[in-house]
Amino acid sequence: MKQSFGWRILVIGILLAVLLNAVPVGTVKAALTSYEIFTLQIHLPEGAEIEWLRLYFYDSNPDANSTAWITTYDGAGNVTDLISVTSDSSAGYGFVISNYVGHVVDNTNLAYVLNVDFGVNNSSNELCGLRVAYMLP
């Protein structure tokens, strides 16, 4: 019986190790050799009203700002940037909040994407997080 219990602990330990390594922790940095935009599809509840976007960042380059925005795609080739927010060139960790947007989510006709442009081709700017504030209908 004790040996069976030991195997269970080993299996649980392995599963926890896999889970902890699979969960992203930390920040996203700009690529060292190329200009890239970090893009992530988002799924919001139908009819929710997007109010604002918050960007959490780390900035060690006062000459370059990170910008985050929400883009919609309608499937017919039309692209619309709904809202954007730009870091404020302050050194270190910080956050900025966009202006109010008041867009009602329409998942039937639109796909929603979060984008971040680091403003540099090195790791001096980092994305710590994004938060989309919305109200349910």
Image (spheres, rainbow, N blue to C red):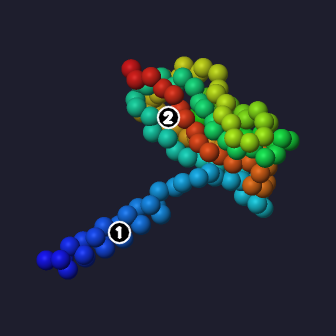
Q: Residue at x 74, y 42 (%)?
A: 92
**Alpha-carbon span between mark 2 and mark 1:** 42 Å
Residue at image position (45%, 29%) is: 106
Task: List the residue tagged with mark 2.
Answer: 110
Residue at image location 58% in from the left, 39% down from the top: 130
Q: Which element carries disc 2, helix, strand or loop?
A: loop
Residue 69 visible, this orientation: no
What's the residue type where badge 2 is placed?
A: Leu
Q: What is the x, y in percent for residue 54?
A: 60, 32
From the viewer's perspective, is 44 left or right of 36? left
Q: Which mark is residue 13?
A: 1
Q: Quadrant of residue 59?
A: top right
Quick one: SS at disc 1?
helix
Count neighbours of disc 1 (C-alpha within 10 A) and say few if under 14, some if 14 to 19, many if 20 or more: few
Depth check, mark 2 against mark 1: the one in front is 1
Residue 19 horizontal/vertical position (percent): 41, 61
Q: Amino acid at mark 1?
A: Gly
Q: Nearer the viewer, residue 74 or 54?
A: 54
The answer to whether 41 is drawn above or below residue 95 in the figure is below
Instruction: Say which label, 2 or 1, has the lower sequence index.
Output: 1
